[in-house]
Amino acid sequence: MQLKVTPMNTDTMTIRQMCDAYDVTPRTLRFYEAKELLFPERLGQKRLFTKRDRARLKLIIRGKRFGFSLEEIRQLLDLYHVGDQQETQFNRAYDIAQRRLADMLAQRDELNAAIDDLQEQLKWGEKMIASMTHSRTNAA
């Protein structure tokens, strides 16, 4: 997914601006807020998303694309404030990413094996159909 982020003249964005910029729905933003992943400022009923919220949303979207769970994403976001120049956050993200990559590679291998098996079954099916068609033609 390609983010459609454009430079903003303000420090905050409305929910509509966030939806347009990041190709998400208002429901998604409210869900992430309820899960305490985003913390928009409130002005009455209006939500105003800060630069921090935008940075967090980018990481959430990237993490979801890579298959990280929301809990893993939350843990990584929470590590930002550990106070070690993000060393802990980077190390934890790297560990999670390595495990996720191993899972994805295993899934790819399983999918490739299933594709190969299905292709073989289709070849067999083609031969059976051709044989049946040939037998029916010769019988007529």
Image: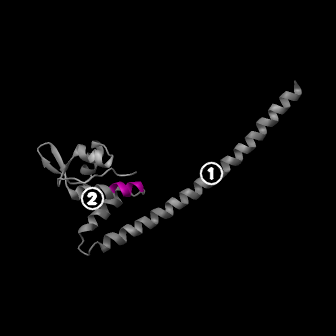
- Majority secondary structure in the magenta region: helix
Percent x, y of residue 3:
35, 52
SS at circle 2: helix
> As drawn, is 134 to the left or to the right of 80?
right
Q: Which amino acid does label 1 sit on?
A: Ala
Residue at x-position 27% and y-position 59%: 55
Question: Where is mark 2, residue-wise?
Answer: 55
Q: Which of 28 and 8 is in front in this view?
A: 8
Residues in magenta?
Answer: 60-65
7 up-or-down from 87: above or below: above
97 up-or-down from 8: above or below: below
For marks 2 and 1, the one nearer the N-term is 2
Q: Residue furthest top?
A: 140
Q: Which of 71 and 123 is in front in this view?
A: 123
Q: What residue type is labelled 2?
A: Ala
> As drawn, is 67 to the left or to the right of 16?
right
The colour style of the image is one colour
Percent x, y of residue 135:
85, 31
Question: Where is mark 1, residue-wise?
Answer: 114
